[in-house]
Image (spheres, coloured by chain):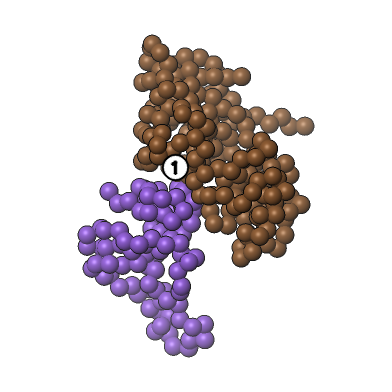
Chain colours: A purple, B brown
Amino acid sequence: MIRIKCPICGLRNETEFTYGADATVKRPEMGEQEQQPWVDYVFNRDNPRGWHKEYWHHVQGCRQWVVLERNTLTHEIGECKLAREVEQ
Amino acid sequence: MLELCSPLNSKLQAGRFGAQGETGIALGGRPVRDLWQIAGWGDFEAAAIEVLSDLGLCGLGSYSLASRAKGRTAWRIAPDKILIENAGNLSDYMSANLATLDLSHARTVILLSGTQARDVLSQLIAIDVTETAFPEGRFLQTGIHHVGVLIQCMGQNAFEIYAPVTWAETVWEVICENAKPFGVEIVAD
Ligand SMILES: [Zn+2]
């Protein structure tokens, strides 16, 4: 059972959340002319073994987006911050 | 004029259900009264404090404790979002920094009480609802049967469950089914 400590609601069952996206992806500068950075941004993702940062949505709770550290190997949960408070 | 009718009308029929003997659970309902949401962006806090203080409520409140004053209740449900019941009409506060929204027709309240009320809740949600962890005055937002609800603790064995009207019947049925083994009294007024 994965439990996530929402900064607003406290420790909650993972079933209250939905996974959103990879939180490590950075959008290229809007003036980027090369195609490859945009292809990478839209389609290509790393598939790391170990610690990873992900967007999750506390949909059955405060409805805030959070950035969650999750270990893809052990399912350990690390820090959980409001996405609005995480610098891009 | 159209008459507003509770989404729980067909459920709110007084009677005794489930296990015989003492009733551990009482179930009822009531409409919400002038339930408004205020939400905003960068300058939300200043704009919200103005509304709240006009209503006699002080401060933005906490994410787990409802603030109460003058028959009004406010819940800080997110950093930039507050729900207020008995708020009157807040439409005049609408501004570039503050969006006001009347949710009175969008929510209804299920009343859950009785000596076994916490047992029923603990069957429905994976959150500690013992009296120490969830005492009177506290609230939590969670899902019952995957429907988003706000649960307000009203006392040792009493809770108000704010459910979306479109799913209120479903939430009611799930609560009622879980309550039957304890004996249920449906209270209709
Ligand atoms: Zn939350």
Q: Residue B152, relative to residue B102: is it above or below?
A: above
Residue beneath disc 1: B143
**How many numbered circles does the render carry?**
1
Residue drawn where x is 44% and y is 42% of the image: B143
Q: Circle 1 sits in a helix, a strand or a loop, which is it?
A: strand
Residue drawn where x is 28% and y is 70% of the image: A47
Residue drawn where x is 43% and y is 16% of the image: B23
The answer to whether one can see residue A1 in this image is yes
Q: Is residue B100 left or right of residue B8?
A: right
Q: Is residue B116 left or right of residue B9?
A: left
Q: Quadrant of residue B43?
A: bottom right
Q: Position of residue B136 (x, y in %)?
A: 49, 35
Q: Position of residue A84 (x, y in %)?
A: 49, 65
Q: Position of residue A60 (x, y in %)?
A: 45, 47
Residue type indicated by callout 1? Gly
> Which quadrant holds the C terminus of chain A?
bottom left
Residue drawn where x is 51% and y is 49% of the image: B63
Name the residue nearer the viewer: A83 or A24. A83
The residue marked by circle 1 belongs to what chain?
B
Name the residue nearer the viewer: A34 or B11. B11
Name the residue nearer the viewer: B77 or B65. B65
Q: Is residue B43 left or right of residue A67?
A: right
The answer to whether one can see residue B177 in this image is no
Name the residue nearer the viewer: B104 or B84. B84
Q: Residue B132, relative to residue B52: is it above or below?
A: above
